[in-house]
């Protein structure tokens, strides 16, 4: 979007047509959905890792063989 605004403002280019605007919004929506999905994926393992550490007994070798 910033590129389109800069192009129109500084180079006096015409605004994009209908299909180009639709394409721009599809790309923006895709980026937002991807970012949201990656945030969910990266948050989930950390939470499940903490939960599994609380449930599992310690595996230390403090008692000999």
Image (cartoon, rainbow, N blue to C red):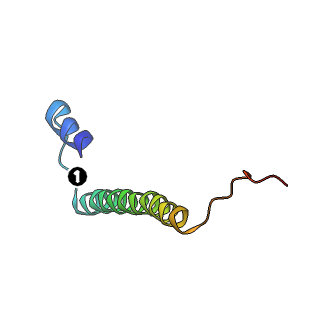
Left or right: 42, with 3 as reference point: right
* Picture mark count: 1
At 22% from the left edge and 52% from the top edge, which residue is drawn? Answer: 16
Coordinates of residue 40 in the picture (x, y in percent): 40, 63
Q: Which residue is mark 1?
A: 16
Outermost residue toward the top in this view: 10
Q: Residues within 10 Å of mark 1 (few under 14, many from 20)?
A: few
Coordinates of residue 42 in the picture (x, y in percent): 45, 57
Coordinates of residue 35 in the picture (x, y in percent): 37, 56
Outermost residue toward the bottom in this view: 55
> Closest to the observer: 61 or 48?
61
Outermost residue toward the front in this view: 63
Q: Is residue 55 above or below residue 11?
A: below
At 68% from the left edge and 58% from the top edge, which residue is drawn? Answer: 59
Considering the numbered disc 1 on the image, is that residue within a helix, a strand or a loop? loop
> Closest to the observer: 64 or 30?
64
At 27% from the left edge and 63% from the top edge, which residue is drawn? Answer: 22
Quadrant housing residue 47 = bottom left
Q: Quadrant of the C terminus?
A: bottom right
> Closest to the observer: 9 or 64?
64
Coordinates of residue 14 in the picture (x, y in percent): 18, 45
At 51% from the left edge and 64% from the top edge, which residue is drawn? Answer: 54
């Amino acid at each position: 979007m910033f590129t389109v605004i800069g192009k129109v403002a500084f180079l006096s280019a015409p605004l994009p047509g209908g299909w180009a605007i639709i394409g721009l919004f599809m790309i923006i929506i895709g980026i937002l959905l991807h970012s949201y999905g990656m945030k969910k994926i990266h948050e989930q393992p950390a939470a499940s890792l903490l939960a599994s550490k609380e449930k599992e007994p310690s595996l230390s070798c403090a008692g000999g063989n």
